């Protein structure tokens, strides 16, 4: 079946530290991959996406590369800020047209000043 | 605001009452999805609707839950005779199509609390 596994949180970092949040997936087809961010009390916002192998999604200093050989889509940022504190969700759309996004359980990031 | 609009943001109900959650998709979007997020968990797909049609309700409990997306007006998720276990955040998303290059855009959710 299709599934997404994220590293457990919370992840606590100091400002300007390097961030990696691991995400691996299982899919039977050719999935599209997404990272969503959820700030406290808000909905999910699309952070970045990649629709095929070797694509790199990037936005607001965050980036993730779709690696088919390791079935991974790790989220990275070179220098985090306090305002990046949020819950990050990795998600998968198994194949085009299935619409049933499959979400990981989320990783809470806390950035300390 | 051209985003997905959900209301109310917070809803409190007593056991046995009905809960009605509304979602207006982004302008130009005709596909609506409802997800449920239990505390400390990811989102779980419930139902996918297009105007006047339920396309897939495989993630929705068979009893007490229903959804609609009428020709005019918002999509409604309705929960009858609520129980404590219905307490969760309910998110609506919309997209232009159901293709992967048209990602789903989410609303801020309705947080339902059952007393």
Image (cartoon, coloured by chain):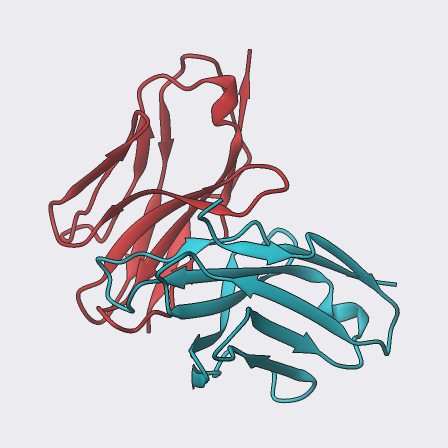
Chain colours: A red, B cyan
Residue that extends furthest to the left in the rendered view of this protein: A54
Q: Which of B26 and A39 is in front in this view?
A: B26
Instruction: Please state, as top left, top right, bottom left or bottom right, where the C terminus of chain B lies in the image.
Output: bottom right
**Figure label count:** 0
Residue that extends furthest to the bottom in the rendered view of this protein: B62
Q: Residue at point 43% right, 85% down?
A: B53
Q: Which of B11 and A81 is in front in this view?
A: B11
Q: Is B95 situated above or below A14?
A: below
Task: Decide if residue B5 is on the left or right side of residue B112.
Answer: left
x, y percentage for residue B56?
A: 42, 83
Task: Decide if residue B96 is on the left or right side of residue A15.
Answer: left
Q: Residue A22 falls in which quadrant of the image? A: top left
Task: Decide if residue A85 is on the left or right side of residue A99.
Answer: right
x, y percentage for residue A49?
A: 26, 47
Q: Which of A110 and B21 is in front in this view?
A: B21
Residue that extends furthest to the front in the rendered view of this protein: B72
Q: Is B70 situated above or below A69?
A: below
x, y percentage for residue B52?
A: 46, 84
Task: Decide if residue A13 is on the left or right side of residue A77.
Answer: right
Q: Residue at point 19% right, 50% down?
A: A70
Q: Is B81 situated above or below B88?
A: below
x, y percentage for residue B5?
A: 54, 54
């Amino acid at each position: 079946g299709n599934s997404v596994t994220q590293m457990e949180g919370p992840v606590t970092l100091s400002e300007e530290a390097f961030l990696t949040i691991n995400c691996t997936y299982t899919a039977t087809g050719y999935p599209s991959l997404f990272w969503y961010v959820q700030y406290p009390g808000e909905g999910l916002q699309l952070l970045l996406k990649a629709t095929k192998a070797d694509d790199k999604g990037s936005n607001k200093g965050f980036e993730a590369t779709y690696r088919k050989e390791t079935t991974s889509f790790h989220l990275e940022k070179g220098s985090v800020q306090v305002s990046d504190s949020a819950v990050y969700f990795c998600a998968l759309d198994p194949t085009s047209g299935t619409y049933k996004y499959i979400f990981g359980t989320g990783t809470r990031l806390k950035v300390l000043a | 605001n051209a985003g997905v609009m959900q209301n109310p943001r917070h809803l409190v109900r007593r056991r046995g009452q009905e809960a009605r959650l509304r979602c207006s998709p982004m302008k130009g979007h005709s596909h609506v999805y409802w997800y449920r997020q239990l505390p400390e968990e990811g989102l779980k797909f419930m139902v996918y609707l297009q105007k006047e049609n339920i396309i897939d309700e495989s993630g929705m409990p068979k009893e007490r839950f229903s959804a609609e997306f009428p020709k005019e007006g918002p999509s409604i998720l309705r929960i009858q005779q609520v129980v404590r276990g219905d307490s969760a955040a309910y998110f609506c998303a919309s997209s232009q199509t159901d293709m992967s290059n048209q990602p789903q855009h989410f609303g801020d959710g309705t947080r339902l609390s059952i007393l």
